[in-house]
Image: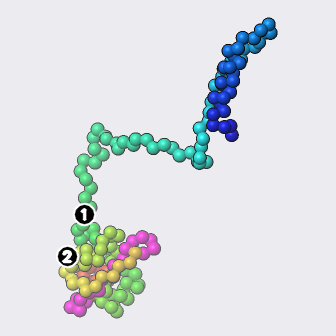
Amino acid sequence: MPAKNAGKAVVATVKVGKKGPSGSKKSVKGKATAVKKRKERFSVQFHRPYTLRTKPSPKCPRRTTPVVRKNDAFSVIRCPLTTESAMKKIEDTNTLVFLVDIRANKQQIKEAVKKLYDIKAVKVNTLIRPDGKKKALIKLHQHHDALDVANKIGILL
């Protein structure tokens, strides 16, 4: 890599040679050419410089009204599960099994069951299945029988 001011030194020597008149000999005039100095780079990668990024300001809104998620009982509880293991839970442990909304919490599930089926839930256990759906195990109060509720819902025929 050339020295920091190497280009300026070359230009100065060319200019000095140009000033002095030569005697009888014909001298070839040297042209003064500036040597372009390269910018020193301290990293191997090139990083794009930051520029002003403006937020889009559309002429009309994309949506006329903001989306409000419904949080009623019908959107919390999707459907009852009717697998063999769910039937065993109904018979043995007085527990109903439902698929519920992935964003619903245990209190919302408890309130939704109370509103939809008029039953009191003692405890709600939730888990997320490998397919990404949320399953709720709802243990009923002693006054309610899970078999009767399942018949009323239509799980058992």
At 40% from the left and 81% from the top, the residue drawn is: 83
What residue would you read off at disc 1?
70
**Nearer to the camera, 85 or 64:** 64
The part of the image, by quadrant, that contains residue 1 is: top right
What residue would you read off at disc 2?
115
Within 10 Å of disc 1 (Cα), the crowding (few <14, some 14-19, many 20+) is few
At 66% from the left and 33% from the top, the residue drawn is: 6
137 is within the stretch colored magenta: yes
At 59% from the left and 38% from the top, the residue drawn is: 39
Q: Which residues are magenta?
A: 129-145
When the figure is inspected, residue 2 is found, relative to residue 43, above or below; the finding is above
Which element type, helix, strand or loop, lies under badge 2?
Answer: helix
Res. 2 in view: yes
The CA distance from mark 2 to mark 1 is: 16 Å
Image position of 122 (left or right of 50): left
Amino acid at circle 1: Lys
Query: Where does residue 35 sit, x and y in percent of width and height?
Result: 65, 28
When the figure is inspected, residue 18 is found, relative to residue 123, above or below; the finding is above
When the figure is inspected, residue 71 is found, relative to residue 89, above or below; the finding is above
